[in-house]
Image (spheres, coloured by chain):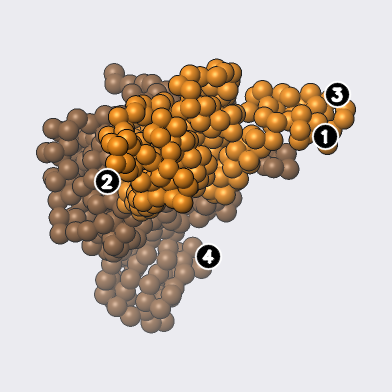
Amino acid sequence: MTSPAIEVRDLEKTYRTFRGKTVSALQGVSLCVEPGTIFGLIGQNGAGKTTLIKILLGLATPTAGAARLLGSSPRDPAARRRVGYLPEQMRLPDYFQAENFLRYMGRLNGVDRAAMKQRIPALIERVGLADARGPVKAYSKGMQQRLGLAQALVNDPEVLFLDEPTDGLDPLGRKDVRDLLAQLRAEGKTIFLNSHLLSEIELVCDRIVILNKGEVARAATPEEFTRGTGEYLVRVAAADDAVRAATAAVAGHGAAQWEQNTLRFAPRDRAQLNSLLDRLRGVPVEIESVEPVRLSLEDFFLQVVSGQEP
Amino acid sequence: MFATYLNSLHESMSRRVALVLFGVAILVAVAFNAVVHVRTLADGATTIVVGTQSPAPPVIAVPSVLESDLRATGSLWLLLAIFAAAPLLTATLEKGWLELTFSKGTARWRIFLGRFVASLTLYSMTFVVATLPVALRLWWMTGIGTWQVGVALVIQTFSFAALLAVTALVTLPQKGVALPIIASVAIWLLSPSLAMRQETFYRIFSSHLARGIVDWAYRILPKCSELEDLCVSFIQGGAIASWWPIWSTGVFTLAVLGLTLWLLERKSF
């Protein structure tokens, strides 16, 4: 059995304000990230996501609980040499050029010169900065983000923390990042992804945790989050009075709602759904589509953070 | 640590800080050399003329010129270098940059110490450029050894290290570069008054408690003015008059720097 890439147990973090008030950023957070998976962390602003990442990278110290990174303490520099990190707010000093910035980041991670000589041009190519020239101060936000991704990969990490990796990228850039994440997963890397773009999290993650007010509100796979609601949308060519009457006979008035030519219907069971479809065909009316209603991750997330957890 | 050291020197060059310091150092060296004239008399004897002063034999004039050089540039250089080095230290803790560097596989204290040593290097190199040319020229033209200047430079760098340690410590609990500069300049300004506390503070404070506090402040804080006096007396006599300012400032520097690195390692960002 392989040991988890990231393990967090009963983690708590409390900040003390100047006036002596205590603010709890994390309360009893426990989670486990298996090697070679993409893990998504979502939550509102102030939910504690960045605090959790900072603890996992040794930047912040927990008030209580334990965090393990690749089996070691995150405060251990040797463990961090096997980790890459793209922070949400990155400040690149103006004087750097892409190559010497990556070289410096590599040196801080103990990458030897020979490895960097090979790796840096390949990385620049991989993140789409092959044509970029000059100091980083001349880079656009998207280019800086790509360079940030490159520095996170310069030590060929086993675990990658990405905080809003698609921030500032255009749709093409976002697709590039998604493709890159898929490649990295195929290479066996563990990715810890923090993003506000829930659709992206839904697309790429193997497991997702919703953090709400410093606590783990839900942890599940994307499929579990976006399961069916038990309702169906039945779209017909034209919903005239005969069609509506046929529907009412099967469904009753409470369980079915028409909106123009689309019926939202919550059948008791599959037999009732088939009975409705038979009745519609008997009217006759052309059935254009029948599809189950699923919650998107965004719907689920909004319900969790507003306290209406499904 | 060496990577950070090199990066800090690169940064100081790119931010023009080092260029300005080197530029001023070259100007100081040129100006000092311009007012010092070495002349050979008809009888073959050499005399030295400084500005409009009367000619003096090298045995007397060389130490005097070097002393004036150190007095003129020593204080100026401490101040200039503190202004130049403080941003190098505070930049380490800038949001968005510290997340990048401190999350890497190098201990924080090594990164910070690399920048500290780079600042010291910047100071000593530029100070050498400002003061050494006139010493070398006098040695070349008169044959009188001016090696004492080298020792004086080391002592001055030692003094700068103490002030830089204060800058580093004050960098930790707050953002911005003003407070670290103010703290170190305040200690530098206070040091002559503390050294002569019988003539300064004792006249203001009559109570034993207040005088005791002043005495302890003197004992603890770096003795920049005494170290400068030590440099001058060393150039004149070639011997260290008292080791007290050196070792007590050394203890202060090590303690403050050690405390800074320890606090940095424990700090939660």
Residue B234 vs A52, above or below: the answer is above
Is B205 displayed left or right of A292 in the figure? right
**Measured Cα–Cα span from mark 3 to mark 4:** 91 Å
**Numbered circle sitting on residue A165:** none
Residue located beneath label 4 in the image: A254
Is B66 displayed left or right of A156 in the figure? right
Count of numbered badges drawn on the protein: 4
Looking at the rendered structure, the kind of residue marked 2 is Phe
Residue lying at 44% horizontally and 50% vertically, measured from the top left: B51
**Measured Cα–Cα span from mark 2 to mark 4:** 64 Å
Residue A21 vs A88, above or below: the answer is above
**Measured Cα–Cα span from mark 4 to mark 1:** 95 Å
Q: Are marks 1 and 2 in contact (CB under 8 Å)?
A: no
Mark 1 vs mark 2, foreground winner is 1
For chain B, the rendered hue is: orange
Q: Secondary structure at mark 1?
A: helix
Q: Which chain is brown?
A: A
Q: Could you tell me residue B160's position as x and y percent? A: 49, 34
Within 10 Å of the Cα at label 3, are there few (<14), some (14-19), or many (20+) other Cα atoms?
few
**Measured Cα–Cα span from mark 1 to mark 3:** 12 Å
Residue lying at 52% horizontally and 65% vertically, measured from the top left: A254
Residue at the far front in the pictured view: B43
Residue located beneath label 3 in the image: B208
Residues at discs 2 and 4 both on one chain: yes
**Measured Cα–Cα span from mark 1 to mark 2:** 57 Å
Looking at the rendered structure, the kind of residue marked 4 is Gly
Looking at the rendered structure, the kind of residue marked 1 is Arg
Q: Secondary structure at mark 3?
A: helix
Residue A250 or residue B179, whichever sits in front: B179
Q: Secondary structure at mark 4?
A: loop
**Numbered circle sitting on residue A101:** 2
